[in-house]
Image: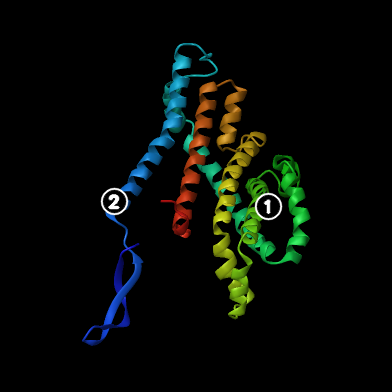
Amino acid sequence: MNALRTPREVPGSAPGRGPATVRLDPTPVRPRGARRGRLSRRLQGVVLSLFGPIVLLGAWEALSRTATIDPRFWPAPSSLVATARDLVVEDGLLHDVRLSLVRVLGGFALGAIPGVALGLAMGLSWPVRALIMPLASTIYALPKIALLPLVIIALGLGEASKLAIVAISIFFLVVLNTMGGVLAIDRSYRDVARNLGASRLEVFVTVALPGALPAIFTGLRLALGFALTVIVGTEFLSSRDGGIGDLIWQSYQTLAIQKMFVGLFATAILGWALTAALDLVERLVIPWRQVD
């Protein structure tokens, strides 16, 4: 059993002394050994997460250096360091990364915020679900990059079309995950809230939203990776507008293989950083989901 501390007083009695007061605290005290074990597990997780990429890069380095794979098309990872430095200093790699990041985050916000709201509404109301579900299933199945010509016709070649295609691409992904999270909540929680006089808004805020948060963050994590994929593909098709996709495409066109790989690595690092940031937000918003 967990040890107890003492902020709250409850009446009791002591033999031969009459009424007494006992102070109890329901807050569990974590043993120091448990905390150390938790830190040790986190350290193990960091080591294991780095082990796979290090092994992959090491194997790639060895195969390229020994010419087992053609180093013209698969240059050794260590040889890309100088290329990356030149791109940062001379060719504006950081500017391209910043452009893609702004487009991803802007489109992500435009698609995710209304997506969460609509998903919650669909989960709570069957008429809304019956109205939206056929449209959501149809558009979700479409290859999103195929919608780019329509978006360009409607919004032109500027930044608005790039933000719009990202928002459209992730919108129904977030909607369906959020709706699934709400539907997975035990209906008795909603019934109890209504029996206690909660309004629809209060049920929405105090039952549906907290209960669906794990599914919402799962959808957001998938949507964030998909948003990065879509924006890089969009930058392929609308080259000369900058961005990591533009860098990769122009490098491919001129057979600048090392520059192309630097762009690919930059995309991978950006995706990892965005996912790590979202994981941190998730830990802050739903700390009860953390696994010991």
User: In x, y percent, where is residue 193?
Assistant: 59, 75
The image quarter in which residue 40 lies:
top left
Measured Cα–Cα span from mark 1 to mark 2: 45 Å
Residue carrying label 2: 33
Q: Total marks drawn?
A: 2
Q: Could you tell whether 159 is left or right of 32 in the image?
A: right
Q: Residue furthest front?
A: 15
Evaluate if marks 1 and 2 touch, with contact meaning CB atoms under 8 Å apart: no
Using the image, determine if residue 25 lies above or below residue 55.
below
- As shown in the figure, which amino acid type bears the numbered disc 1? Phe
In this view of the protein, which residue sits in the foreground, 247 or 139? Answer: 139
In this view of the protein, which residue sits in the foreground, 60 or 259? Answer: 60
Q: Could you tell whether 23 is left or right of 163 in the image?
A: left
In this view of the protein, which residue sits in the foreground, 248 or 207? Answer: 207
Using the image, determine if residue 280 lies above or below residue 95.
below
Q: Residue at x 61, y 41 (%)?
A: 231
Residue 83 visible in the displayed image: no
- As shown in the figure, which amino acid type bears the numbered disc 2? Gly
Q: Residue at x 57, y 26 (%)?
A: 251
Quarter of the rendering occupied by the N terminus: bottom left
Q: Could you tell whether 164 is left or right of 84 in the image?
A: right
Residue carrying label 1: 172
Using the image, determine if residue 98 lies above or below residue 172.
above
User: In x, y percent, where is residue 70?
Assistant: 53, 13
First of labels 1, 2 by sequence position: 2
In this view of the protein, which residue sits in the foreground, 72 or 140? Answer: 140
* Residue at disc 1, secondary structure: helix
User: In x, y percent, where is residue 290?
Assistant: 44, 53
The image quarter in which residue 206 lies:
bottom right
Using the image, determine if residue 194 lies above or below residue 122.
below
Q: Residues within 10 Å of mark 2 (few under 14, many from 20)?
A: few
